[in-house]
Image (cartoon, rainbow, N blue to C red):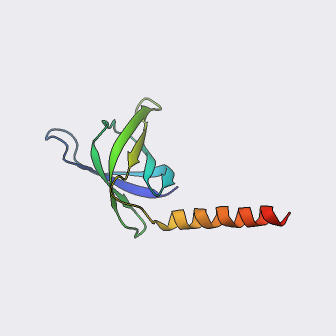
Amino acid sequence: MMEVNLVPMGRESGESGESERTYTDNVSAHGVRVHSTSAWQRGEQVEVIPMKEEMSVRGEVVYCQRVGKERFFVGFKFPHEHVSWSILKRFNGLVFTNILCAMRW
């Protein structure tokens, strides 16, 4: 889990163009799932900006699932970029370490 800012790209005037500070539920090199207080439409563009000095990335909404009165899970794919955030490096290292430990037994 990591904290991020979501900045909508190109929403029509009259709709909120402000960023939303939130956190991820799932992260991969090709996309991210976040908690949001906004309903997003499939195909909308967003800039995902990690709060801890990581590189920002542009994503595209692939789904928006309501999970409460004012809460949503939103899936963004990163169609043009391969993300190398440090959280992914830590996770990959843990998986590799666990595989090596399992092989020893």
Q: Position of residue 40 (x, y in %)?
A: 32, 38
Relative to 89, is 50 on the left or the right? Answer: left
Q: Position of residue 6 (x, y in %)?
A: 33, 52
Q: Position of residue 54 (x, y in %)?
A: 40, 68
Q: In which quadrant of the rendered image does the C terminus lie? A: bottom right
Total marks drawn? 0
- Residue nearer the viewer, 92 or 10: 92
- Residue nearer the viewer, 33 or 21: 33
- Residue nearer the viewer, 13 or 60: 60
Q: Indicate whether 76 appears above or below 72.
A: below
Relative to 99, is 22 on the left or the right? Answer: left
Q: Residue furthest top?
A: 69
Residue positioned 46% across, 65% down in the render: 85
Give residue 12's quadrant in the image. top left
Residue positioned 74% across, 66% down in the render: 100
Give residue 14's quadrant in the image. top left
Q: Indicate whether 12 appears above or below 46.
A: above
Relative to 6, is 26 on the left or the right? Answer: right
Relative to 56, is 14 on the left or the right? Answer: left
Residue positioned 27% across, 42% down in the render: 44
Q: Residue furthest bottom?
A: 53
Q: Residue furthest right?
A: 105
Q: Residue furthest front?
A: 103
Residue positioned 43% across, 29% down in the render: 69
Q: Indicate whether 96 appears above or below 19.
A: below
Q: Where is residue 58 in the image (x, y as percent from the top left)?
A: 31, 55
